[in-house]
Image: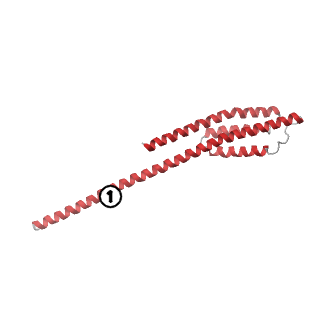
Amino acid sequence: MLEPVTTVSVVSALSVLLGFVTSAATEYFRDSRTSKREREAREATRKSQIADRRIGFQRETLLSLQEAVLEEARSAAQISLADEREYRETGKWGQPLPEGLSDKARDNTVKTLMLMERVRDKDIRDLTKAFRNYANQVGICRSLEDERVALQNMGDALPALQERIGIVLRQLDDDEDMGGEKRNS
């Protein structure tokens, strides 16, 4: 049998060792939890930044699309006026457009198409396609009456498109506000 002093020394040594191991294990688990929380916080921040960038991109795209659609409508109206003026002067329909007008209309159409494809909202893309179909008919119609109908259809399509863009812009603002509240909670 061991001497009492040696047993006390061994028990003391084992107690110190057990305390050290327990303390190290506790610190390891605490650090693991802290690391996990920090990792989750970084991931949440990253996701929030991505969402903010996506919202900002959509907002800028929609604002640019609103302007591009109006420019395309102006170009179509200018084409119609040029066609009508030429028809009144010559009595012939479908004469060449004045210098630069066709290029301007094409540039506006391309810009609208490019912006439309960047928009996430399907309703806006569909409304933009309908608007563009009418706008593209102006200038290629077979008669003054047909062109007036195309111009009227284009004008009728415009308010619904602008309204939908406004709705989505407000939703983006609301989404951004909600994201800020979630981050601040």
**85 and 9: which is toward the camera:** 85
Residue at (48% x, 51% y) in the render: 46
Q: Position of residue 57 (x, y in %)?
A: 58, 46
Looking at the rendering, which quadrant does residue 133 occupy? top right
Badge 1 local density, few (<14 within 10 Å), some, or many (20+)?
A: few
Residue at (66% x, 33% y) in the render: 159
* Disc 1 secondary structure class: helix
Q: Position of residue 94 (x, y in %)?
A: 84, 39
Which three-letter amino acid code belongs to the residue tagged 1?
Tyr
Q: Quadrant of the N terminus?
A: bottom left
Q: Residue placed farthest to the right in the image? A: 90
Residue at the disc numbered 1: 28
172 is higher (above) or lower (below) than 14? above
Q: Is residue 61 rendered to the left or right of residue 73?
A: left
Residue 78 in view, yes or no? yes
Residue 142 in view, yes or no? no
Q: Is residue 85 rendered to the left or right of residue 113?
A: right
Residue at (20% x, 63% y) in the render: 14
Q: Quadrant of the C terminus?
A: top left
158 is higher (above) or lower (below) than 118? above
Q: Position of residue 181 (x, y in %)?
A: 46, 41
Q: Is residue 18 rendered to the left or right of residue 68?
A: left
Looking at the rendering, which quadrant does residue 64 occupy? top right
**126 and 56: which is toward the camera:** 56
Looking at the rendering, which quadrant does residue 154 occupy? top right
- Count of marks, rendered view: 1
Q: Position of residue 119 (x, y in %)?
A: 61, 43
Residue at (58% x, 35% y) in the render: 167
22 is higher (above) or lower (below) than 60? below
Identify the image's colour scheme: rainbow, by chain, secondary structure or one colour.
secondary structure
